[in-house]
Amino acid sequence: MTATIINQRSSSETIIRVPQRKIEALVGGVLMNTVGKAAQKHILNKSKLVAKEIHLPKCGYTMYYHEREAVNEPNQDVHNHPTIIFFHGLSMRSEELAGFIKSLDIPPHIRILCPEQMGHGRDIDNRLRTDPDNYTMPTHQRMLESTSEFLDVVKCSSNTNAFGISLGGAVCYYIQNHRPDIIQRAILVSPAILCCVDKDLVNGIRDGTSNFFCLKSRQDAKLLMRDLSTGRDDDTRKKKDPVPKFFLETVYREARKKSPEGHFRELLLHLLEPTDEYAAAKDVDTESHRLVIWPEKDRIINYEEGKQFFQVSSSDNKDGGLISKSANTEFECVADCGHVFHSDGRGILFDIIRPRVKEYLLNFKGY
């Protein structure tokens, strides 16, 4: 006869922890799947964005996107009507920008386009999940070529402004350089240009010590939220965790549903591989009109690296503003803010930048 000694403390902790996480997942899940999804559906309807798809014959690719068609005004040149194109960030779906777009109160005569990048959203749903053996990870060049052809196939006018955040900011930067015949003005928010991505984050993704957007546990979800604020090691902010703890289990579980395990890590590893065309250490497009917005304490896309890339220095004016060597580049900093969350624990980046984005983005030809 053998006897097994039970560690009472560890056993009770296990008994408590598992139900607690189930309860947290249940509570967070109910909020996300009822209130959250209902609100998202309501916002999408209010934004008038409609899900569409279009085949790109040169690339041999079907691009998924959302569009709000323009309500043409009397005597308006329909071939040159103003258009705004939005580029989403890593792991996002195009419809997830609907709330921000709706908050900008864009006039109805302006067309809105939100293409979904390769490796995201319906590309995952309709290609990766259905035929994983034949799925090919996108490259920078492939994303640029497909986005460029998309602009032609949907007949995007030459009177177009663009907005991109994070990964979408990098796409926006390169497509404006590649298609100056279409993109007239652009807003880049923390653009994930290769040399600007935080070096510690890159090393962590490569050596497997960081599960950034590749969550394997609730602890990963907690650290991700902290990194999207002013960093996991920042003890000065008011709230160490920018989201309620009971949401973390739901964030983790929803992330697991969003894509097959390991997808976003593999995608990141592909996109972090430098190539000659995308490895420049400073701005290769000094003529384009653009506004660059960068959170000062961004731990994902490094603020100081961004200043170096756009050759930014403090101006001689008393306001202590920033100035770029590129004459048509405006560079602005969001103080005490991370990639998504402000250090005060209340504000998020989209809310903070909204007035400035609206002011710049709605200024079309004639600026």
Image: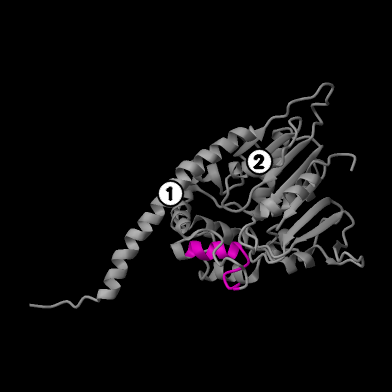
Residue at label 2?
114
Residue 49 visible here: no
Q: How crowded is the residue under tag 1: few (<14 C-alpha within 10 Å), some, or many (20+)? A: many
The residue pinned by badge 1 equals: 29
Which residue is found at the position 44% from the left and 51% from the top?
Answer: 28
Quadrant placement of the N terminus: bottom left
The quadrant of the rendering that contains the C terminus is top right
- State the image coordinates of residue 149 (x, y, percent, origin top left): 70, 40
Q: Secondary structure at mark 1?
A: helix
14 relative to 173 in the view: left or right? left
Q: CA distance from mark 2 to mark 1?
A: 27 Å
Asked whether 345 falls inside the magenta stretch, the response is: no
- In the image, residue 237 above or below residue 361: below
User: How many numbered discs?
Assistant: 2
Amino acid at circle 1? Gly
Disc 2 or 1, which lies upstream in sequence?
Answer: 1
Residue 40 position, x and y percent, is 55, 40
Which amino acid, mark 2?
Cys
- Mark 2 nearby-residue class (10 Å; few <14, some 14–19, many ≥20): many
Q: Is residue 230 magenta?
A: yes
Nearer mark to the viewer, of 2 and 1: 1
Q: Quadrant of residue 16?
A: bottom left
Highlighted magenta segment, given as a residue range = 220-235
**Where residue 268 sits: x, y (%)?**
58, 59
The percent position of residue 14, horizontal first and vertical second, equals 31, 67
